[in-house]
Image (spheres, coloured by chain):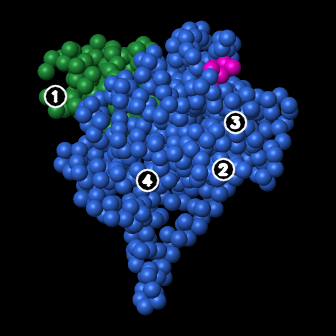
Amino acid sequence: MLDVNGFEVLDLGIDVPVQKFVDTVKETGTKVVGLSGFLTLAFDSMKETVDAIEAAGLRNNVKIMIGGGQMDEQVRDFTGADAYGKDAMAAVKLAQGWIGG
Amino acid sequence: MEKKWEEMSSDEKQEAQFQKLLAPKDPEGNDLKFQSPEADANYKASINRIKDAVQLKKTPDRVPVTILPSMFPYINAGMTVEEAMYDYDKCTAAFKKFMLEFKPDMNIGASAPGPGKFYEILDYKLYAWPGHGVAPEHSYQCNEGEYMTAGEYDLLLTDPSFYFRNFYLPRVFGALEGFTMLPPLTGILEMYGVAFSFIPYALPPVQDTFKALFEAGAEALKWAMAMGGSDFELKSLGFPNILGGFTKAPFDVIGDTLRGTRGIMVDMYRQPDKLLKAMEALVPIMIGMGIGASQQTGNPQIFMPLHKGADGFLSDEQFKKFYWPAFKAVMVGLIEGGCIPFPALEGHWGSRLEIIQDVPKGKTMWMVDQTDMAKAKETLGKNACLIGNVPSSMLGLTTPDEVKDYCKKLIDTGGKGGGFIMSNGAFFDKAKPENVKAMVDFTREYGVYE
């Protein structure tokens, strides 16, 4: 959905290690990171990813959004992400609000 | 004289199913011996509570409460998902511990982890599971793909079983490769030439496939014995299993594991007539799947996990044209067969409520995930029992007091006048035990009807 709305999207795949997010943010200078998770087990992985981006000193460079089955404001708060979206269109609106497009 | 099953109305069939549940038998067919008079009373009170909640004729004595977990009982018992999948005794012991710790009115059994060894024997490719693509402590995950190609609708329509055996199954189970060499069973007609149809069974790849099937069958039986034993033990302790089996909405059958999400979305535009015909063909098959499972387990509730009908995947027009008619036809068929369809509205379904409220009254129960309970009650809730919808985030991240506040709101809205079962809204793996406990205990206190 982000892709067809004109954003350049880098799909890192599934079950992506935390370090890969950090490296990708560093290397590409991306402005937005999107994390998707469907299971309650994803709450912790998402928090770890946000924490790692913070620890690498990159947190101020990016906006982080989360989405997927069990995500809501509560989970957003827990993970430290900037926003959550209910569906793929919400991701487009969030990205447009943050970086235009 | 008692009426024969075929002569009963759907009301009478449903009533007969509940009466059967109220008089449980042991595996030998004798009356089940409860471990205490209290267990006997609890079991029957729970069945009556569910019956009242489903039928919408009167309010139950209190709001029934259940927990519908995926891997939570095993993770909470300190084991990995891998252990629960490979050690059936550990799996059932953890589930018993979970039931005794939280004491929900009813349960769905210990079958969520499934038999790990069985999947290995058949080289199951449709899912990744611990040791086979995901970490030991994680749950299994579907590897979505186009396991049916865009050009195969005619094959599926001509003979669904042949299509499944010769094309779909060998793609999702590596060990079933030999099935690709088998001729259709419908060619076996008369003496002349009949032997030709059996020649492929002499071929080594076919024989390897059958050897794998024998081994897989033995493993499935071993697992089923453990599950069945656990079920009877829990029943004798006063905890009924409410899961009679499962089936699916035809749109999800094709969209989940045959064509995949992308495939079915494209088919709605490129070959809508074939998609509609295929779903029509699947309706009796999905009805039969539910009724068959219900006859095996003796439980009328047939679970239907709903996926692609949720808000956002389809437009309203597409939902009305592609998703709803076949889904409703499956529910109606199940009801006529004496079953209670138990669909799960996974995700958000707010935009679909006006449409899906059109179901026979007192015959269905719906698991509500993130749809607003008050809105669901005003629409679907007029005709159907609603189950839910304590969010996973709340069970995992908040405090028992916050859970209680939420449950109070649920009982005041969803529980008004009956027709409501307290539960989590979506299957969950991780949660704070004290929050899960708060959901159950609070409902027992506050959920009593005047």
- Counting from the top left corner in percent of width and height, residue A78 is at 45, 15
**Residue matched to label 4:** B284
Question: Which chain is mark 1 on?
Answer: A
Distance from label 4 to label 1 (Cα)? 41 Å
Dot 1 falls on a residue whose secondary structure is loop
The image's mark for residue B240 is 3
Give the extent of the magenta segment: B59-64
Distance from label 3 to label 2 (Cα)? 27 Å
Evaluate whether residue B91 shows in this view.
no
Q: Colour of chain A?
A: green
Mark 4 or mark 3: name the one nearer the start of the chain.
3
Residue beneath the point at 65% across and 47% down: B298
Q: Colour of chain B?
A: blue
Query: Amino acid under label 1?
Result: Asn
Query: Amino acid under label 2?
Result: Lys
Camera-side mark, 3 or 2: 2
The image's mark for residue B3 is 2
- Counting from the top left corner in percent of width and height, residue B191 is at 46, 89
Distance from label 1 to label 2 (Cα)? 62 Å
Mark 3 or mark 2: name the one nearer the start of the chain.
2
Residue beneath the point at 38% across and 35% down: A16
Question: Which chain is mark 3 on?
Answer: B
- For the residues beneath circles 4 and 1, the answer to whether they share a chain is no
Q: Which image quadrant is residue B214 in?
A: bottom right
